[in-house]
Image (cartoon, rainbow, N blue to C red):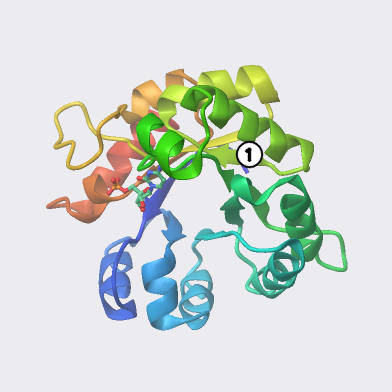
Amino acid sequence: MGKDVIVACDFATAEQTFAFLDKFTGRKPFVKIGMELFYAEGPEIVRQIKARGHKIFLDLKLHDIPNTVKKAMAVLSKLDVDITNLHAAGTVSMMEAALEGLTREDGTRPLLIAVTQLTSTDQERMESDILIKEPIDQVVIHYAKNAAKAGLDGVVCSPLEAGKIHENCGAGFLTITPGVRFADGDKGDQKRVMTPAEAKKIGSDYIVVGRPITAAEDPVAAYERCVAEFID
Ligand code: C5P
């Protein structure tokens, strides 16, 4: 799989999601399904979107004891998604177990990506709430290295961190970056943003774009603009 634009389908129901996806009559976007939609509609929503010809990033961010994550990943692997993820904070053993669970009998598996530190966690919270005293950028790199050591395919990170991650974990280690906005667009609640063209320049492998596409007057045109800036 090469570079691609992943559309975050942060909708509450299948109905809203299909009304949105119905607009795409040409190129079918790679779709991110998160907890809200998955918990509302169950695994059937994944099968239905897959049957419509979309690639899927199932963003459920697993974090539990290795045995539980392994078994949960074995169930998810049957959904035939293209990418799924977990929290690197679950340790290298948990990530190794996840990979084992995700790998099908024939050796194939979806790509497995780690979340490092959530962007909602800042230095102050990390130190006071979870007693991690190192600088947050070093924590992110350390978690990414752990993910690489466990055999995972990449991490979710800010586009601003993608270059550093590639330097530390190798050019082939994937970076999936949210926080993307058009130069003339509204930033919303995202603080550190990049345009699709900038994300391409710094070497993001996949960009995750939500509201700049889902809330656009013409979502298909906004999607095509992202593709043109990021891939073409
Ligand atoms: O609407 P917007 O483009 O901000 O959506 C970005 C998507 O990426 C959302 O689904 C959000 O939950 C997700 N995300 C993020 N920042 C992270 C991790 C995930 O914005 N650090």
The picture places residue 88, in percent across and down from the top left corner, at 62, 45
Q: Is residue 13 visible?
A: yes
Front residue of 146/232: it is: 146
Per the image, label 1 sits on a secondary structure element best described as strand
Front residue of 110/85: it is: 85
Q: Is residue 47 left or right of residue 167?
A: left
Q: Is residue 173 visible?
A: no
158 vs 49: above or below: above
Front residue of 1/74: it is: 74
Which residue position holds label 1?
Answer: 154
Q: Image point 44% across, 57% down: which residue? A: 32
Front residue of 187/213: it is: 187
The picture places residue 208, in percent across and down from the top left corner, at 40, 44
Image quadrant in which you'd find residue 80: bottom right
Q: Image point 35% across, 43% down: which residue? A: 120
Dot 1, crowdedness within 10 Å: few (<14), some or many (≥20)? many
Q: Image point 27% across, 66% down: which residue? A: 20
Residue reaching furthest to the right: 106
Q: Is residue 228 left or right of residue 169?
A: left
35 vs 148: above or below: below
Q: Image point 53% across, 19% down: which residue? A: 163
53 vs 212: above or below: below
The picture places residue 140, in percent across and down from the top left corner, at 54, 31
The picture places residue 85, in percent across and down from the top left corner, at 58, 54
Q: Is residue 137 left or right of residue 63?
A: left
Q: Amino acid type of disc 1?
A: Gly
Q: Quadrant of the C terminus?
A: top left
Image quadrant in which you'd find residue 209: top left
Q: Quadrant of the N terminus?
A: top right
